[in-house]
Structures are given as C-alpha cells and as structure tokens.
Amino acid sequence: EPTHEPAPAPAAPQVRPAQLPRAPAGFVGRADEFRSVERALAPGAPGLALVVGQAGVGKTSLALRWAHAHVGDYPDGQLFADLHGFDGAAPADPSAVIAGFLLALGLPQHAVPDDPAAAQALYRSMLARRRLLILLDDARESAQVRPLLAPGGGSAVIVTSRLRLDGLLALDGAALVPVGLLDEDEGLALLRAALGEERIGREPDAALELVRLCSGLPLALRITAARLAGHPHWSLRSVADELGDEQQRLAALSVEDADITAALTLSVRALDDEAQAVFSALSAVPGSDVTAHAIAAACRMPLAASRRALGVLASAHLIEERSLGRYSCHDLVQLFSRTYGAGGRADRLRGLLDFYVHAAYTASRTYDPAGRPCCDLPDWCERPPALPRLDDRPRVLDWYAAESANLCAAIEAAARAGEHDRAWRLTVLVWPLLTWQSHRDWIPVVTHGLHAARAAGDPRAETRVANLLGWTVFAAGRAAEALPLLERSRELALRTGDACDLAQALLNLGLVHGGLGKFEDAVAAYDEAAEAAEHMRDYGTAALALHHMARLCLDEGMPDRALVHAERARALPGPRGLTGVLLCDVQAMALCRTGEPQAALRLLQEGLAMARGEKFLAGEMSVLEHLAEVTEKLGLTSEAQAHRRAAELLRDRLEAAAREPLPA
C-alpha cells in the first residue's frame, strides 16, 4: 500500500533562492502592522502571518517591505509565489507552486515527483533542514495555502489575501494582520514621498483634500501621485476638483495597469451570487452605515441570508463592521457599488425606504402607544422580511439614536428620488427623535418632508408635516417664522375636518403666540387644543397643552393658575413619556412658588428619575436647574451647588451637540 511519508531528499546543490520581488518605493507608515508580523514570525510563534485587507490597501507592499528588511534572519533564502487569487487569472494550483519551489531549492527537474502528495512530502523534507522566508501573495482560500506551509524548524510564511482566511486562523494558528486605510498624516507622507515636500507645501489644503477623496487608500493615492508626477504643471487643486466630481472620480483613478475600478471588480466577481446582490444593494444605502435588517429589505432576502452575505463582504474587506451589526464602506467602494449595482437601484432604494418606514412606525407606536398613529401604512409600502426588536421604550430610544443619521439621509434620498409618499411618512414618523433631541437643528430634514408632502398633493400629509416643521422652527428660537407654517397647518386641518390634526396645530400655535408675547392668544390656543384632544381621548396631546399653559402662567407670575393646569394634566389617564418629566417639573415649580418647596422637592426628584430613564437630556437639565433653586430655598446649599454644576455640564453637552450638523 503506497504511503506519503517524507522520503529522504535527493542530493541537491545548496541553492539559496532569492525570489522576492523588488521592495516598493515610497512606502510609509504601517509601524503597528510591522510589529504584528514581527510577533507572528518570532521564535516560538506559529511562524505564519496572514496579512489581510481590501484591494489596493497595500498588503503586498507591507509584506515585501517587511521581508526585505528581514532577509538576514533567513539565511537559506526566500521563496515567493503569486497565487493569483483575485487578478482575473486562474488561481494557482498548489502542486504547481510546490514544483516551482522544489526547483528553486536546487532539485533537478527530473527529480520532482509527478504525484502531488509525494511532491508535498518532499517539499516538507527539504524545508525541515532550512530556515527560509516564504511569501504567498494573493491567496484565494485556505486550501490553496495549506500545502505550501512550512513544517516548522525555523522557516516562516507570510500570506496576503483580500479575504480573512478563517481556516488558516482556526486550524493552522495563523496570526491575523489586518491592513487598513491610511490616516491623514500617513496619506500626506505618501504624497510627499512621491511628489516632494515643496510641491505639497505649496498647496497643503489641496493635498489634504486629495487624501480624503482617495479615502486613504494607498493604491488610489499612488495613482493620483503618478498622474501628478507625470504632469508637473498640474496643480494639486485641479486634480482635487476633478476627483471631487463623483461622476469622474473612479475614472480618474487609473494609470496604465493600476486601476481602482479593475481591482474592485475582481474582488466583487469573486463573491457568490448572494453576496454580489448585497454588494449591489450598497449602491442604494443613503446613510453612513447599514444593518442586516435594512439589507434584507433592499434585497428581499431572509435576514439570515443578509447576515451571511454581509459577513462575506466584511471578510473580503469590501465593508467593515465598525460596531456590532452595523456595516459601512469607504467612499470609493460606495461609488463603485453605484456603477456595479446601477441596474435595479431604484427598486432596492424603495425596499430600504419601506424598511425605515415600517421600523419607524413600530418605534413610534411603542414610544407613544396611547397616541394616534401619525400616518397610515398603505398596501404599497412593502413589509420588510424582518424588523429589529422595538418592543419597549429603551430599545426604541437606542434604535432612534443609532439610526438618526440614516433616517435623515433616507428622508432626503426619498425626496430626491421622487418617492414623496415615503418621504413625508418617514418625516412624521421620526417625531420622537425630534422631541427627544430638540437641541439639534432638524429644520433642513423636516423641510425635505414638507416639500415631499406638497408634491404628493395630500392635504393631510401637508398638515402634519407643516405642524412638525412649525414646532421645529419654534424650538430653534424662530417663533415669527413658525407662525405661518402653523397657521397653514390649522387651516388645512379645518379643511380636512381632522380634529386630531387641529388639536396638534393649535397646541403649537399656543407655543408660538407665547413666544411672541401674546399671552391671551396663547391661552386660547392651548385651551382649545386641550379641549379638542380630551374630547377625542388623546390624553397625551391634552396633557402637553395643559403643561404649556401651566408653564406660560408661571412665566407670567401666576403660579396658582399654573398649579391648576398642571394638576389637571397629571390627573389625565395614560402614559406620559417625556411629557411626564415636563409635568413634574412645572408642577414642582408651581408648588415651590406657592409656598410648598418640600412637595416641590419630591416631585422634582421623581421627574429627575423619569428624565434619566427616558434619556431626556433637556428635561434632565431643566429639572436639575429647578432642584438647585428648590434646595437652596430649603437651605441645602451643598446639594444646590451640586445640582447647579450637573445642570451646567448637561447644558455644555447639549450646546456641543447642537453644533453638530445633521445631514441636510
């Protein structure tokens, strides 16, 4: 029975192969990655480094640079093989690679075994007596690499791949060395190395913009540097302007045999059909990241299939899982996906938008189960294959926080694509996010929704979005600008006969009249809103109207009247949410100013716990400010100071957050 035990190697001349290709010029950075390779190949380590990253990120450059820097550590030479995993050619057969290695090690052609197993056994025998560095470039799968690994005894192997070869990690003890994008300083260093300090120094801002437009991808930066080096009369600004045009960017990132589009095409074509479909769906993603639930809706596939395909894309380094379950890709990959997935993009966008509409609808109903739904879900709004868990308020708040930028981008994308019915629905469905984060500038986002509602020709839609925009403009401190929006909302509500829409418009009109110093008009609007809402058993709107009336009375120096309105509001049935915090706050201050500071303290402590439970920072800040006032009145000076400091810290946080722009 034949066996494949290592046979004594035929006598061969002592040949010291030196197969490494030339070390790359202009190499910058990668100190951490160098150290990772060093640890993987150190004495006592497994001797196998797996260098992974996306196309063009510089995996081979890193491996070659390290190998050339350490040739002295491997006195018996270096072996190199291009495994052609992703270059469009047929992947290299490990048996053919072994045959080539045996010849490089000095074995005569006639002595190379024809039997692959025998050749592999002989290869291991010859390596056992040598200390070699073996570089296996562009591997496609673990099975292609495994026969080429050194058996130990001092030789070391570096493998590069666009894929995270989990088999090598799990079964062969490979140490993973991920290679990511260059940061701004490293990108500028690469341009300096190629173009010279003087040229970069003349246009530092344009140079920095080139790094950003190339997404820190070394291949893109090298192509850009090569074009500039070949045209010394070109300015960096002119090339930055060219790359700034998304329609031209990928075409501009090509010189001779270096081409970003070609590199990405080979990576995507190596994927299975399901993963390619998901990659195409990235072209429709409006925001900065995406989840498996959203992709499942865009591709009309089961959630499990979506998760698996996203995992494949992450393994291929086409996307990155930057936080648990949330995937994103850099700008060049996103641009390429728009070309690759151009066919069917509109349909995938509709699937994504319908996911956001259904998820936001579910979230808003959980957030305010007693309130009336702010829109319907018509039959044409396709139910997604799966929704995230949104069955309690903490999960809803977490979802809104995680998806806030995506929701804004989805509203704009829907409006831009002419999906007006989806755009206005999504706008009104994010109202909990607007009220919870009222310190942010939501005006541009809601304005997109209003344009969509008007384009849809639906007066009920315009009523609701105009009302939301009116409140948003008022919350930004622009009461005079909010007035015509809210008067239009009231007018449309009267025309459609929708009492709930009318109550909402009146409530916000009361806010605006109060902000403009029109006390009687404000009281009348609040009173009418509360009465209409209570008649419809919309107790949340009624309580909010009474809260605003109580607050107005306090501001006008009428704490007795404020207390009546606050007590009436707190007596209404139903859950309160953020309104509950506001009611505790206003009733407490009415009690304090009518001579009951101890009762006020108890209410404020209740309100503080509620605000923190709701993650309602603006409400928490207000309660803390009033706690400082009440505790000081009670002679609790140190507690008052602590509350005041806590309120000031929250104010700083809110002001910093307000300066962060939302997607417009």
Image (cartoon, rainbow, N blue to C red):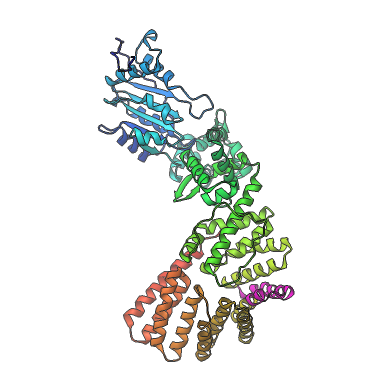
Q: Point out residue 283 in the picture as x, y percentages from the top left corner.
A: 59, 45
Residue stretch rendered in magenta on the structure: 477-504
Instruction: Tell whether position 479 is magenta.
Output: yes
Q: Left or right: where does residue 348 sit relative to residue 218?
A: right
Please name whichever residue, 574 or 542, is drawn nearer the observer in this view of the structure.
574
State the image quarter where residue 161 is shown.
top left
Against 635, residue 256 (above or below) is above
Please name whichever residue, 188 or 84, is drawn nearer the observer in this view of the structure.
84
Q: Point out residue 280 in the picture as x, y percentages from the top left corner.
A: 59, 42
| Residue found farthest to the front | 1
Residue drawn 31% across and 35% down? 40
Against 92, residue 456 (above or below) is below
How many numbered marks appear?
A: 0
| Residue found farthest to the top | 110
Q: Point out residue 52 in the picture as x, y percentages from the top left corner.
A: 42, 36
Q: Point out residue 579 in the picture as x, y percentages from the top left corner.
A: 51, 76
Quadrant containing the N terminus in the rendered view: top left
Taking the image as drawn, is residue 74 in sight?
Answer: yes
Q: Is the magenta stretch mostly helix, strand or loop?
A: helix
Taking the image as drawn, is residue 554 in sight?
Answer: no
Against 436, residue 138 (above or below) is above
Residue drawn 28% across and 23% down? 131
State the image quarter where residue 547 is shown.
bottom right
Against 612, residue 183 (above or below) is above
Instruction: Tell whether position 156 is magenta.
Output: no
Please name whichever residue, 89 or 574, is drawn nearer the observer in this view of the structure.
574
Quadrant containing the C terminus in the rendered view: bottom right
